[in-house]
Image (tube, helix red, strand yellow):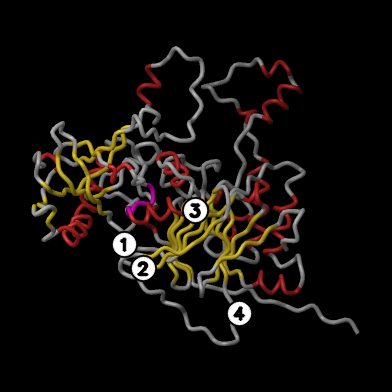
Amino acid sequence: MASETPVFERQQTVYETDPQFQLDTHSYQTQYVDIYFLRLAKLKRIVEAHGRERWDNVEVHGEPVRRVERVLDVRQGELCWVAGTIYMEMPLKPNVLEDIAKDHFISAPPPRQKYRDFEKDKIVIEDESGRLQLTGSKIQTEDLVTGCVVGVMGTETANGEFEVIDMVLPELPPQQERSNLPKTPSQQKKYVAFVSGLGITGNIHESIETHLLVEYLLGEAGSPEDNSKSSSISRLIVAGNSLSEPHAQAADDAAAASPSRATKSKKYGYDATSYNAKPTTVLDTILSDLCASISVTLMPGETDPANASLPQQKMHPTMFPTAKYYSGSTFIPSTNPHSCEIDGVRFLGTSGQTIDDVFKYVDGDDRLEMMERTLRWRLVAPTAPDTLWCYPFQDDDQFVIEKCPHVYFVGNQPEFGTRLTHGLNNQVVRLITIPKFSETGELVLLDLETLECEVISFKSRSSGV
């Protein structure tokens, strides 16, 4: 008698979305400078509290360290400290006004991998009163970006520069204890799965890895042990770039079929033949298949059909005519950045643009280190609006991290990586870089109880599943 196929039940979790990055209005009628004033007003008091803790009653060569309220209150020869916003003067950094003025080149120069030039860059601290150039070996060895708020201690030199001796950051924000739900001994582990960079093209020969991923999550592939584990995955978070970069293949096909159409002028610079609906249709099919069994959170990314400015708003459900019927239950379009709570574990993540931009400012290649720095700056997108598009907030800087997450993830990175980072007040955060699935074929699983990570590979040459 043949043995019966075991039946596994999908593990469920309590999911709550944080509306921090949802926008009520989409207006560009205000100045971007308001963001820096709002950011400084919110973080300056936190930095100053750390500064008092470190430098009050401290003497250097018999001279006490004095706090000054504003940057312009710094006096030459006096040992003091001040808090302000960092601005990086970098000749290699793109400048929109200069690009407009340079109309003699036919096409724009290619984007640079790094903006950093240690010989030419200048680091400046500024507040509402003015700015002061920073110098010294201490500040040169720190990885800083435009927009982070810090406190610096030192003295003004004869040439008007401020030589930095020490520096403080806002550090990790307060972290709530994980309110784990009661667990009985018979319950299975619960996992949250992460994937990014699916890069759906809509081609008839879509990658075999994508099909294997869907089958694994639905419990239709692998051994009974694999099916048991996939049933323990309570939620899939898709961290951006679900669709491939748009290309003009549809327009090329139309031109080949009808040469006369190729020479037809475009109305308002738009050519309807260049639109290809196949990738969205394929993604809709994948999402609807998954949502029948597992909860899916869909974040937009750089290549997805969403607004380019951060925070990117959720992709409209009507773009997915089949998956939209699961809206409100297992299909949850979300923002980028995204913040939520799953079974008492707080998550914060982006689709990758934030860390990709920080990468251009710093000298190293350690993406986990960059993620840790953004937590210590308390800014999920520190380089916005300087070199990263964002909305001009007027009432509040929504990129300030006010609640420390337990899990901080970033999608579309070169490779998988993870480690724990610790705060001054016993905060513990799991950092995760999620690789592009279209390049690596990797799915990341997070154990909700232990916050340990593991990777499942769907590359055809390996035995991942």
Q: Position of residue 246 (x, y in %)?
A: 60, 35
- Amino acid type of the residue tagged 2 in the rendering: Gln
Mark 2 → mark 4, Cα distance in angstroms: 27 Å
Mark 2 sits on what residue? 427
Q: What residue do we see at 31% from left, 32% from top?
A: 89
Horizontal side of residue 202 vs 297, given as left or right: right
Report the residue at 79% width, 77% height from top: 5
Q: Quadrant of the N terminus?
A: bottom right
Of badges 4 and 1, nearer the viewer stands 1
Which quadrant of the view contains residue 213? bottom right
Residue type beneath disc 3 = Val
10 Å crowding of disc 4: few (<14), some (14-19), many (20+): some
Tell whether 395 sits left or right of 321: left
Q: Is residue 449 magenta?
A: no
Vertical arrangement, residue 241 with respect to residue 219, above or below: above
Q: Amino acid at mark 4?
A: Gln
CB contact under 8 Å: marks 1 and 3: no
Which numbered circle lies on residue 188? Answer: 4
Which residue matches tag 3? 410
Q: Are marks 2 and 1 in contact (CB under 8 Å)?
A: yes
Which numbered mark, 3 or 4, is in the foreground of this view? 3
Closer to the chain start, of discs 3 and 2, is 3
Q: Secondary structure at mark 3?
A: strand
How packed mark 1 is, by other alpha carbons closer than 10 Å (few <14, some 14-19, many 20 or more), is many
Secondary element under disc 2, as helix, strand or loop, is: loop
- In three-dimensional space, the C-alpha distance between marks 1 and 3, rounded to whole angstroms, equals 19 Å
Quadrant in the picture for the C terminus: bottom right
Q: Nearer the viewer, residue 186 or 324?
A: 186
- What's drawn in magenta, residue-wise? 377-381
Report which residue position mark 1 lands on. Answer: 173
